[in-house]
Image (cartoon, rainbow, N blue to C red):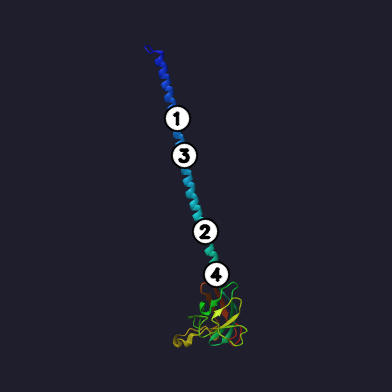
Amino acid sequence: MSGTSSFEVSTMKNTNMKNNNTQEQDTMAAIGIGAMIVFIALILVAAVAAAVIIQTAEKLQQNAQSTGEDTTDEMSGKVQILNVFVNDDAESYEVYFRLAAGSDDTADTGILWQISCSDQNGDFQYIAGDFGDTDGDVIGLGDDTATDVDSVEAGVAYRFTLDANDNAVAPATANDCSPSALFNANVKATLYIHVVGGGTTYDILKVNDATEGAVVV
């Protein structure tokens, strides 16, 4: 360091120290900014994850509620078949029934029925209607006046005359699942009863005796 004074050396040292301090301070600021960016990113990720979890939980809750309501309607809004008797051997059955516990009052036209069977030749027979049909009235048990009702109440037993032979509508192509038809062909019939907006009930009808008043099993 010939030709350099001690003052110049001292000045150079001070300048280097200032540069080092400035560089160190700049490095610390960069680390702080990086940490802040990471922290903000974590907050954003957490917010997105929370939104997804909340949305999923709400959807699951809605699905569970909808499923529960549908199950309740299906289980409570249905017909319980108490018994079936022969009414007219060539035409109809007398169906004793009531609505399941917890069911809402239901209009007779809101209760649908269908019956199917095979004839002696094995041909498929099908008849359908509703409990508001003019062929059969819905009558409360114990009603001596046999008054037709338009609304079925839960917890009350009723009877309905189900016409299982549609020969009055289409004689040439009549479908017949009447007691005599089942008895003569030695076949069974399947009876379905649907409640609109509710559940479905079915029963297998086997006629061992086609006389009026005989129990259908």
Number of numbered markers: 4
Q: Residue 117: x, y in percent?
A: 51, 80
User: In this orientation, which residue lies closer to the viewer: 43 or 127?
Assistant: 43
Q: Label 2 amino acid? A: Leu
What residue is at 53 percent from the left and 59 percent from the top? 61
Name the element at disc 1: helix
Name the element at disc 2: helix
| Residue designated by label 4 | 73
Marked residue nearer the N-terminal end (4 or 3): 3
Q: Label 1 amino acid? A: Gln
Dot 3: few (<14), some (14–19), or many (≥20) neighbours within 10 Å? Answer: few
Is 19 positioned to the left or the right of 115 in the image? left
Residue 37 sits above or below residue 82 on the image: above
Marked residue nearer the N-terminal end (1 or 2): 1
Is 192 positioned to the left or the right of 23 in the image? right
**How far apart are the alpha carbons under marks 1 and 2?**
53 Å
Dot in front, 1 or 2: 1
Q: Label 4 amino acid? A: Asp
Q: Residue 169: x, y in percent?
A: 46, 86
Dot 4: few (<14), some (14–19), or many (≥20) neighbours within 10 Å? Answer: some
Indicate which disc residue 143 carries: none
**How far apart are the alpha carbons under marks 4 and 2?**
20 Å
The answer, for residue 217, to whether it is visible in the render is no
| Residue designated by label 2 | 60
Residues under numbered marks 4 and 3 in contact, where contact means CB atoms less than 8 Å apart: no
Indicate which disc residue 25 carries: 1
Q: Label 3 amino acid? A: Met
The answer, for residue 33, to whether it is visible in the render is yes
Name the element at disc 4: helix
Name the element at disc 3: helix
